[in-house]
Amino acid sequence: MSGGSTVAPKIAVPDVTNQVLENAVTTLKDLGFEVVPVAEETTTVDTNVVWKQVPLPGEEISKGDTVTIVYNPSNAPMAVPNLAGLTIEQARTALLNLGLTIGVITQQNDPTAPADTIIASVPKSGEQVLGGATIDLIVSQGSGVVEIPNVQGQTSQAARSVLEGEPYKFLITVVEEASTTVESGRVTRTSPTIGADTTKGSAVTIYVSTGQATIAVPLVSGLTEAQARAKLTSSGFIVKVEYIEVTTGNANDGRVIAQDPSMNVQSTPGSQVLLKVGKAIAATTTVAPTTTTPATTTTPATTTTPATTIPTPTTLPTP
């Protein structure tokens, strides 16, 4: 069916009983299986020969699955071979030839031995052991000097994943610090610094941003404008002033009446603080308008002279 996940094919476990231990291990590893040899005495086969296995021959399992093989160890004491300079796989083969198996593997810095090669074994070379014994190995990590990788800008989790993994294996301490340039939750720097040489597995501190630092806005209400400006600018704030009219002689004349943000509010340096400052306005003098009264003109009285009546002459009758 298209689009579905691919299922890894199963592989039938071969029959490795009655094989010499080394050959049995090689056969199983070549098929991709993990192999666990177990020493257990029996009288049915010769020494170092496999006489039992789990899973049984023919069973189908996946690559990477484990097959346990049981072999007959030798009862005769034997000397631990010299494994110095061998790789782990080379040492495994040498030990299996003797019916011995690898136990605990410990890594150690050693500038004289190439990385991933064996420095020593426990029991050490030449000591007598019985068949089936486990031999612990000490493996070189080389000089152990590594360079601090660049994890700046990565999240704390991503940086730790890199630094705690191979080839560094650092012991990480996380310290938080404010930053104006690095986003909160991301690495600002390391100690030792990025690019410095240090020892594998050593202590490294990563500094993680908490974002831009904030400080408490100081109380400036009641101060003069000049005092308030000085106090705020010294703390890194930008000051904006609005004037509020007050009467002449008012105690708030020239002083801060209100501030925004208010006292103790956390704010970032470079942000603005608004001040409202009292300012007396000089009183306006009102001059009354002058009223001019026009002079009174006296008009002389007019005297009317009565008309003179002239008597009409009387006409006498004619005699």
Image: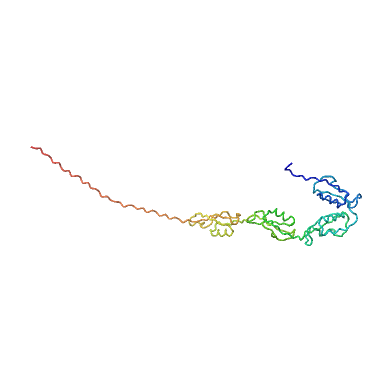
In the image, 148: left or right of 125?
Answer: left
Instruction: Check the image and tell me how it is coloured.
Output: rainbow
Of residues 221 and 143, the one nearer the viewer is 143
In the image, 175: left or right of 222?
Answer: right
Residue 116, position in %: x, y? 79, 57
Looking at the rendered structure, the number of numbered marks drawn on it comes to 0
In the image, 281: left or right of 112?
Answer: left
Q: Is residue 307 above or below residue 175?
A: above
Residue 77, position in %: x, y? 90, 57
Q: Give the quadrant of residue 189.
A: bottom right
Q: Residue furthest bottom?
A: 112
Q: Quadrant of the C terminus?
A: top left
Residue 83, position in %: x, y? 83, 58
Q: Quadrant of the N terminus?
A: top right
Q: Give the quadrant of residue 111.
A: bottom right
Of residues 15 and 296, the one nearer the viewer is 15
Residue 103, position in %: x, y? 83, 55
Q: Residue furthest right?
A: 43
Of residues 28 and 190, the one nearer the viewer is 28
Of residues 46 and 303, the one nearer the viewer is 46
